[in-house]
Amino acid sequence: MEEKTYDWVSLHQHTGYSLLDSSAKIPELISKAKELGMKSIAITDHGVMYGCVDFYKEAKEQGIKPIIGCEVYVAGKSMHIKQNDKENENYHLVLLVKNETGYKNLMKIVSKASVEGFYYKPRTDHDYLKKHSEGLISLSACLGGEIQSYILKGNLSKAKEIALLYKDIFKDGFYLELQYHGMEEQEKVNEELIKMSKELDIPLVATNDVHYIKKKIIKLMMFCCASRQEKL
């Protein structure tokens, strides 16, 4: 029987190492990707790379190409500022490894964020990303991304400014990330990102921002999210 293949690659994917934000166990995740006929899959946990070695080994064992990555937190101004500041809010950004240099740079970014940039979350910043961007691909992330946040605030000029900043940092390795989860805010953001892509000559990529494998555990995930946000 011919093995089923699927051109879709999940580039924004969380595992149980995204604490209280994902229930996906690595072996089950890889098995599901293989079942769907995917040739490759990424790991992009929040701010950490704890699961990358297990992910790599499991993917290789099951014949799936692993893509190592992380959804990092980026401070709006500087990771060294440790105080509440509207201009220094934390934003999400997906980083994916292209090669060995990129892997080393991602480890530096994530480690520095935890050791020197930690303030509620492990944070990096634009300056440090620029110094360690070689070998990395970047996606603009979810509604928590910097560009998306400014779109939702109605500040399109600032959103474009940040998009151009990331384009300068990552060159042709920066992508505006489209997602669709049935939310009105997401539709508004997608519309502006598509316009921005054409205007600024920045390519688009579609992702799902996956946090769980089976639909039946949605209630558990809602509980985890509420617990994380202290809404219980």
Image (cartoon, helix red, strand yellow):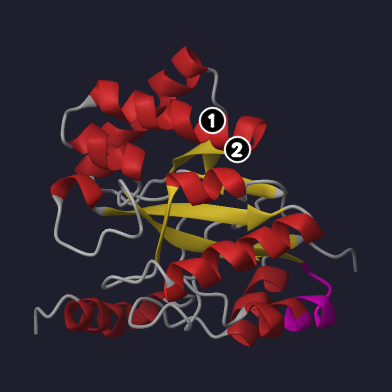
Residue 149 disc label? none
Query: Given contact means CB atoms under 8 Å apart, are the residues at marks 1 and 2 in contact?
Result: yes
Stretch in magenta: 57-65
Please provide percent x and percent y for residue 73: 39, 60
In magenta segment, residue 62: yes
Q: Amino acid at mark 2?
A: Phe
Q: Is label 2 in a helix, a strand or a loop?
A: helix
Residue 170 disc label? 2
Quadrant of image for the C terminus: bottom left
Whether residue 38 is visible to the viewer of this picture, yes or no, is: no
Image side of residue 34 versus residue 204, left or right: right
Whether residue 218 is visible to the viewer of this picture, yes or no, is: yes
Q: Is residue 133 above or below residue 20?
A: above
Q: Quadrant of residue 92?
A: bottom left
Work out whether residue 191 or residue 125 is closer to the camera in this orientation and state it. Answer: 125
Please provide percent x and percent y for residue 108: 60, 65
Image side of residue 74 versus residue 50, left or right: left
Q: Residue at x 29, y 48 (%)?
A: 182
Q: Residue at x 41, y 21 (%)?
A: 196
Q: CA distance from mark 1 to mark 2?
A: 5 Å
Image side of residue 149 versus residue 178, left or right: left
Q: Is residue 229 above or below residue 91?
A: below
Please provide percent x and percent y for residue 175: 55, 37
Q: Quadrant of residue 122?
A: bottom left
Q: Residues within 10 Å of mark 2 (few under 14, many from 20)?
A: many
Q: Residue at x 37, y 50 (%)?
A: 142
Q: Residue at x 48, y 23 (%)?
A: 197
Image side of residue 122 versus residue 101, left or right: left
Residue 167 disc label? 1
Q: Is residue 151 above or below residue 227?
A: above
Q: Is label 1 in a helix, a strand or a loop?
A: helix
